[in-house]
Image (cartoon, grey):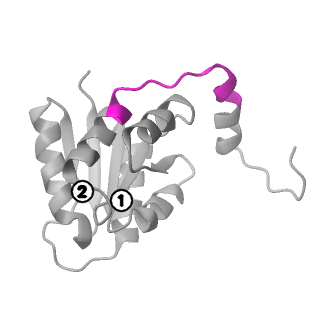
Amino acid sequence: MVQRIAIASDHAAFAMKAELADWLRAEGHDVVDLGPATDARVDYPDFGFTLAAAIAGGPADRGIALCGSGIGISIAVNRHPALRCALVSEPLSAALAREHNDANAIAMGARLIGIEQAKACVAAFLGTDFAGGRHAGRIDKLSHPRFEKEPA
């Protein structure tokens, strides 16, 4: 199924972003490359916030966030209340992020995984549907958090 995918990175993951964007286009997806345009030093929060906005209210169905470790940009993306971005490094986690957590973005670390593993993660993420059922109530809680000392 063709999807509209937003992709963004920092400088450390620029090459991986470019290769994934080309691969996704070759697979028939509509890709929105949110930058950066070069491998010059940039700050990952700027690109994470832009990716989140593109998914939450904009032109993208799903997102791929990349930085050196994947950690920083995943934190940035998850600052948006409508985003559920999972840091993944192998296909099973990418599939479970969709199936159980209804993730609308994944993050990966270009310094930690290679391009073939990244492609496998993206394929698993895009090819998996949200299971709903017992997971739906948990996702609703993520959209309406309550911060208490004791779990509800």
Q: For residue 34, which numbered disc appears in the image?
A: 2
At a point 12% along the width and 37% down the height, the residue shown is 25
Q: For residue 63, which numbered disc appears in the image?
A: none
- Above or below, 133 against 54 in this view is above
The quarter of the picture where residue 114 lies is bottom left
The quarter of the picture where residue 79 lies is bottom right
Whether residue 10 is visible to the viewer of this picture, yes or no, is: yes
Q: Name the residue under label 1.
A: 50
| Residue 129 among magenta residues | yes
Bounds of the magenta segment:
124-137
At a point 27% along the width and 46% down the height, the residue shown is 117
Q: Residues within 10 Å of mark 2 (few under 14, many from 20)?
A: some
Query: Amino acid type of disc 1?
Result: Thr
Point out residue 45 in the picture as x, y percentages from the top left corner: 40, 69
- Above or below, 1 against 85 in this view is above
Secondary structure state at the residue bearing disc 1:
helix
| Residue 88 among magenta residues | no
Secondary structure state at the residue bearing disc 2:
loop
Q: In this view, does 54 lie to the left or right of 72?
A: left
